[in-house]
Amino acid sequence: MSKYEEGLKIIEERFGNNKDNFISLATIDIEPSADGNPRPVVRDVDAYYEDGVFYVVTYAKTKKMLQIEQNKEVAFSANFDWFSGNGIGENLGWVLDPKNAELRTKLRTVFAEWYDYANNEKDKNCCILAIRITRGTVIKDHGAVRYNMDFVNKIETSEGKII
């Protein structure tokens, strides 16, 4: 098994298997900082993980979705689970769109405890955000083992690099 495959196995164990994961999601604000530089914005979200993608149910008019519309590059950190990286954010559209039916069923199951309380599916702005991981670092044994992963080329690589 390659180091990349070992890393994927750890990620699947920690975040897969129909878990409601809490991740911090960073985007770039539409408005620059006072000195004119891009300004990162971070917030915590509930996310479902499957095959290199985190899925989030959200609202299309939130700042995060408007920011992703302008700049699809995002960063994430899985709170206290030693996994962080970068990805591409994509609005998959309305949760009730027939193309989202299978994924919606999974999301409703994983987020069952709070899904109906937090979401109004009748509103066409209730959407699914896909965070397609491009690069990630997963750590085990308090840093003794580190996997730097290029999800695009499906290999282990130098920290922070995509080949």
Image (tube, rainbow, N blue to C red):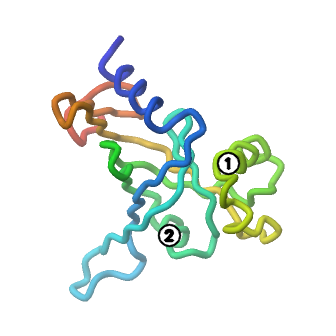
Q: Which mark is residue 107?
A: 1
Q: Amino acid at mark 2?
A: Lys
User: Between residues 72 and 101, which one lies in front from this camera angle?
Assistant: 101
Q: Quadrant of the C terminus?
A: top left
Q: Is residue 155 above or below residue 115?
A: above
Q: Which mark is residue 64?
A: 2
Of the residues under marks 2 and 1, which one precedes in the sequence?
2
Left or right of 22, for residue 95: right
Q: Quadrant of the N terminus?
A: top left
- On the image, the x and y values in percent for residue 34 come to 25, 88
| Residue at (49% x, 36% y) in the render | 52
Left or right of 132, for residue 95: right
| Residue at (20% x, 28% y) in the render | 145
SS class, disc 1: helix
Left or right of 74, for residue 90: right
- On the image, the x and y values in percent for residue 72 come to 47, 59
Q: Is residue 19 above or below residue 157?
A: below
